[in-house]
Amino acid sequence: IPMTFDGVLWPKDFRSLSVATSVVEIDLSTYFPIVYCQLAIPFLQKFYLHCATPIAIVITIKLAKLLVYLCPEQSQSEESTARKSARLAIADKCIIFVVMMLYPGLSRRIFEIFRCHDMKHEQLGSRLYHDYSVICWQDEHLIAVFFAIMGIVFFSIGIPIAMIFGLWRNRDSLHDKSHPKHRDTLRRFGYLYSSYEPYYWWWEIVIVCHKCFMTSVLV
């Protein structure tokens, strides 16, 4: 909250608490200066690091998933096949969980790239609000804007669309325990719908969009 509504004079203790809770958002750049002051990096590099974090995590999980898929079972029984299927479903669940943790913080940082401050002195022009050494709409900022637009399309907008598509495609097996795919669907997407009534299987997407609005658009 203090990062989004930074115009409010929040108490110092509350700000410190908000920094501590940023570990939930898997924002590594927040902890670099705490470990060693020279590890503090400029805002644009924080942006690139934050954008690369979900990609690196997803690739790591996908590689582990591939190894599980390629690893031959000692037996080809129905039980071993079901066990392998369960492992693959759990890997997908891990990806969804990590993306959900990253979503609010990364969406906020993506939109912060567009937050510029017009300086009173004409020669100073427009500067990036979180790093006054960066001139807006020139050179390195334009590169960051390009990646920010890609982030909005594929992350801030793409994630809710992918979630609703995944749930809709498996809608018949969400709550039907007799459905052959029910167990795998529950392992993969249970985090998104199991807490809601069957009719409102889509409600988590509404909450995700609300998070995007509260932490990003209000920036």
Image: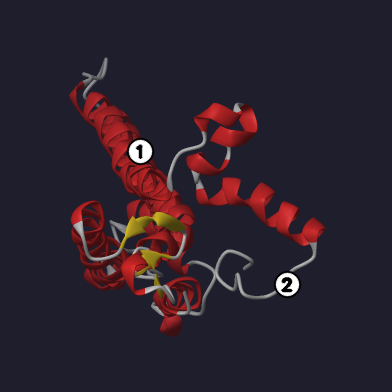
In the picture, measured across the screen, residue 90 lies left or right of residue 22, that is left
Whole-percent x, y for residue 14 in the image = 77, 61
**Looking at the image, which is closer to me, 62 or 174?**
62
Q: Amino acid at mark 2?
A: Leu
Q: Quadrant of residue 179?
A: bottom left
x 59%, y 30%: residue: 37
Q: Quadrant of residue 201?
A: bottom left
Q: Which residue is mark 1?
A: 57
Whole-percent x, y for residue 61 in the image = 32, 35
In this rendering, which labeled residue sits more in front, label 1 or label 2?
A: 2
**Looking at the image, which is closer to me, 123 or 9?**
123
Q: CA distance from mark 1 to mark 2?
A: 35 Å
In the rendered image, the quadrant that contains the N terminus is bottom right
For the rendered model, the colour scheme is: secondary structure
In the image, is residue 54 above or below residue 153?
Answer: above
For numbered disc 1, what is the local secondary structure?
helix
Q: Which residue is mark 2?
A: 9
x 44%, y 60%: residue: 190
Mark 1 / mark 2, whichever is N-terminal: 2
Residue most extreme to the bottom:
199
The answer to whether residue 177 is seen in the rendering is: no
x 50%, y 45%: residue: 26
Q: Amino acid at mark 1?
A: Ile
For numbered disc 2, what is the local secondary structure?
loop
